Image (tube, coloured by chain):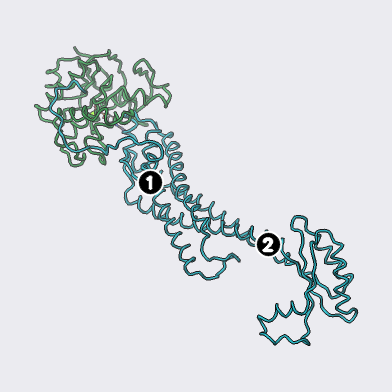
Chain colours: A green, B cyan
Amino acid sequence: MRYGMGPEVLRDVSFHLAPGSFHFLTGPSGAGKTSLLKLMFMAQRPSRGLITMFGRDIATLPRAELPDLRRRVGVVFQEFRLLDHLTTYENVALPLRIQGRPEASYRDDVRELLAWVGLGERMQARPPTLSGGEKQRAAIARAVVAQPDLLLADEPTGNVDPEMGKRLLRLFMELNRLGTSILIATHDHALVEEAGATELMLKGGRLTIRG
Amino acid sequence: MANTPAKPASDDPAVLGEEPPRKGYAAMLSALLVETRSVMPSAGATGLSLVLVIAAMCFLASLALGAALSVSHVTSDWTRDLSGALTIEVKPTNAMTPDEQIRAVLYVLSRSEGVVSAKALGHEDMKALLEPWLGTGNVTDDLPLPHLIDVRIDATSPPDLEALAQAIVAVAPGAQLDTHRQWQDQLMSAARAAEWLAYAVLIVVAATMVAIVTFATRAGLSANREVVEVLHLTGARDRFIAAEVQRHFLHLGFRGGMIGLFLSLTAFLALALQGSNTTMFMVPMSGLRLEYYPALLFVPLAAALVSVLTARITVMRTLHRLL
Ligand SMILES: Nc1ncnc2c1ncn2[C@@H]1O[C@H](COP(=O)(O)OP(=O)(O)O)[C@@H](O)[C@H]1O
Ligand SMILES: [Mg+2]
């Protein structure tokens, strides 16, 4: 894929994520990790090539069917993209609210999840008043709250201390154990080694698979 | 995430307004009066100025509606009054004596279709008519007065007044049919024009409101592009976003409408209290008739409806252009 008339960012990329698998996506900064994830959560369309998500070719997917597909994918954005006018609680509950679930049916789950990522005391705070690490954890909580079939996380441990990084990795592994496929873009090699999962390496627009 | 190792959920007060679900009209009313938190940021300062603009629009709309209703009431009164009297004025001429003139006119009237009765006013009748202006005793017998004939016509099948007027002049020169009708016709058409003008004002006001709300909705969406994109990526459908946006506009519209209604009620009540016989477009403006006040309630409801529909349509159309 390419941005506008720019150079082709991803050129030779071919892989398959089995349901319930756990992968890391690594590569130097600017290698195109974020770009690849954007393709996968359908924020960008590929300029060429075939991308199939849950058995659907996303290039020909009608616009009206995008929401259903996106609800099966949880995304942790590199720059978090929390909604500043909502509280942390509301941000995390957003995917459930969008699915039309009544608040009473998920309130306790959301609080429990927030407490688990260490934001129990910050539920009513708005994102601008959160620290970088807190924002990151809120973004992760939002991505996992609806138990998606696929979780895409872009540098999800970039702003937290190693201790919290391990804790978050446990959250991802727990989610994976429950059946969610996980793809984590990172350049934190300690994290990759800790998990010992398959590594997709991006470099110069090409993808190689290790492990 | 029920399976995550649990820490006891903190017991802070209700996180979002949790209201017991209400049914029917109560739910509709509470939806209209209480704005629940939206996922879309509300417009803030723009919200207030938008309310004020809508209030001004609704003020104009209420005045126009009140005027239209008043005018149409007056014209229907006039239409009913047409069943009333005609007058024939008999001026003295050298050719005939007044009595001859009157007899000839009465004869023509008695043979005309649609005339119910005709009666020449005697000297005493004339005196009774004039004394309020001239004072008792001042209408002397030698005061030269025209003779008048009072004619009642059948309102359901009135006579052909043109023909009647010609027939009367033919038999009795100096006799003149005063139909009031030509006069009334002109008044009527002026009043009708005023009524249409009032409705035109209503339409222009509605169109302006649509334009303003469209503009505000678009501005709101483009200011919150990031929010819209995050909502989309989280799996929101356009109609979810539209619902969140239009809820905000429902309240803007309704609040503006109520303020406008309140202002116009004040204006109408002030007119009523002043109790003057001022007229506007020949319509007595002694305030709005009591039975028309409820009709003004229609204005804030229409404002809310117009504002909601416009916002919804605008959001759906704008979002459709996004990925
Ligand atoms: N929105 C964009 N418009 C144009 N170029 C972009 C855009 N986003 C990323 N790029 C370019 O694409 C390349 C890959 O970027 P990115 O996918 O963010 O890499 P990574 O996430 O691995 O650091 C970079 O050269 C970057 O400059
Ligand atoms: Mg990146």
Mark 2, residue position: B81
* Circle 1 Cα neighbour tier, 10 Å, few/some/many (<14 / 14–19 / ≥20): many
Q: Hey, which residue is sitting farthest front in the picture?
A: B124
Q: Position of residue B84 (x, y in %)?
A: 71, 63
Label 1 secondary element: helix
Q: Position of residue B237 (x, y in %)?
A: 38, 30
Q: CA distance from mark 1 to mark 2?
A: 46 Å
Is residue A140 shown to the viewer in this render?
Answer: no
Mark 1, residue position: B251
Residue type of the residue flagged with mark 1? His
At 74% from the left edge and 87% from the top edge, which residue is drawn? B140
Specify the subunit that label 2 lies on: B
Residue type of the residue flagged with mark 2? Asp
Q: Where A112 sits versus B147, above or below?
A: above
Is residue B108 shown to the viewer in this render?
Answer: yes
Q: Position of residue B259 (x, y in %)?
A: 40, 55
Q: For residue B189, which numbered disc appears in the image?
A: none
| Quadrant of the picture in which ligand 2 is shown | top left
Label 2 secondary element: helix
